[in-house]
Amino acid sequence: MIGLRLKCSIGVGAMPSTTQILTWAIIGIVVWLVLNLRQRREAGDNRKRDEQYDAKRYTEENVRKAQIDFEDRLEKNPDLPDAIRGRNAYIYRNLMSSWFSSLIAKQRYTEAMAKELRADWLSYMSLLEGSCTSSFLSAEANSEAGREKYGKQYDDERRELEAIENAFAAQIGQEAVATLAEVRLRRYDAFDRGGRNLAPPGFHYFPTSFTPYVDGLVPDKKSSSPV
């Protein structure tokens, strides 16, 4: 009898009423709404913080400071193994820097376009440093896996970097596009180490002193074979 009563008690208790089912359903809906509202509020807060961060990061003042810091490293660190030198430094100093100044001046009163230019400029400086570091790490890696890893990283950074160069040149005009293409085709030793000068045809730069480091213009070797 005791077992029968217990069995009946369990059976009766396991059958929720319609009111209980509705109550649980309402509670479930309320909990879902609260959680959904909280997620939407957090997403909105994160989006707002991101917008505030972007607004601060891409201001004229912040980008100018980033460029000053970048150029300070460019000047002070020429002897580091991953320093920006030669062709890379030349393109930055003699092409990209002036192109950015010209383009940003034209878009000064169009904030959306100015923000995109500043974003590209910050990315460009970062990619320039990053690609030089990746190239060095790939060359110095002790394993094939390491060389492949940093080699791929270098290729990706160079791809993005050159896309920004191409975009800037295209916005400046056909002459800038042609100049960029010509500079990319010059030999590595056509540029002095600091990237300030480009050798005239028939000459290249060669170190004439290492302490202190001095570049000198020397004539290209002419072939001794008959023309």
Image (tube, helix red, strand yellow):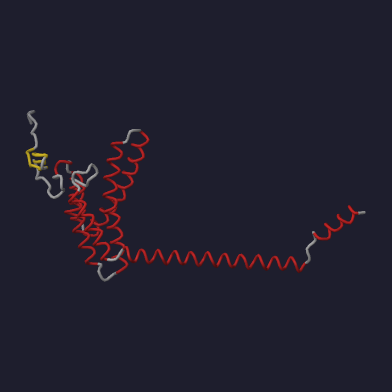
Rendered residue at 37%/35% (across/down): 145
Percent of width and height locating residue 183? 18, 47
Percent of width and height locating residue 2? 90, 54
Where is the N terminus found, in terms of image quarters? bottom right
Q: Residue furthest front?
A: 2
Percent of width and height locating residue 120? 29, 58
Please identify the quarter of the rendering in which residue 223 is found. Answer: top left
Q: Is residue 133 above or below residue 142?
A: below
Please identify the quarter of the rendering in which residue 20 is found. Answer: bottom right
Q: Left or right of 4: which side holds 159?
A: left
Q: Residue furthest right?
A: 1
Please identify the quarter of the rendering in which residue 189 is found. Answer: top left
Q: Is residue 99 above or below residue 84?
A: below
Rendered residue at 20%/62% (across/down): 101
Rendered residue at 18%/59% (across/down): 98
Q: Residue furthest top?
A: 225
Percent of width and height locating residue 151? 32, 40
Rendered residue at 32%/67% (across/down): 112
Q: Left or right of 192: which side holds 17?
A: right
Where is the C terminus found, in terms of image quarters? top left
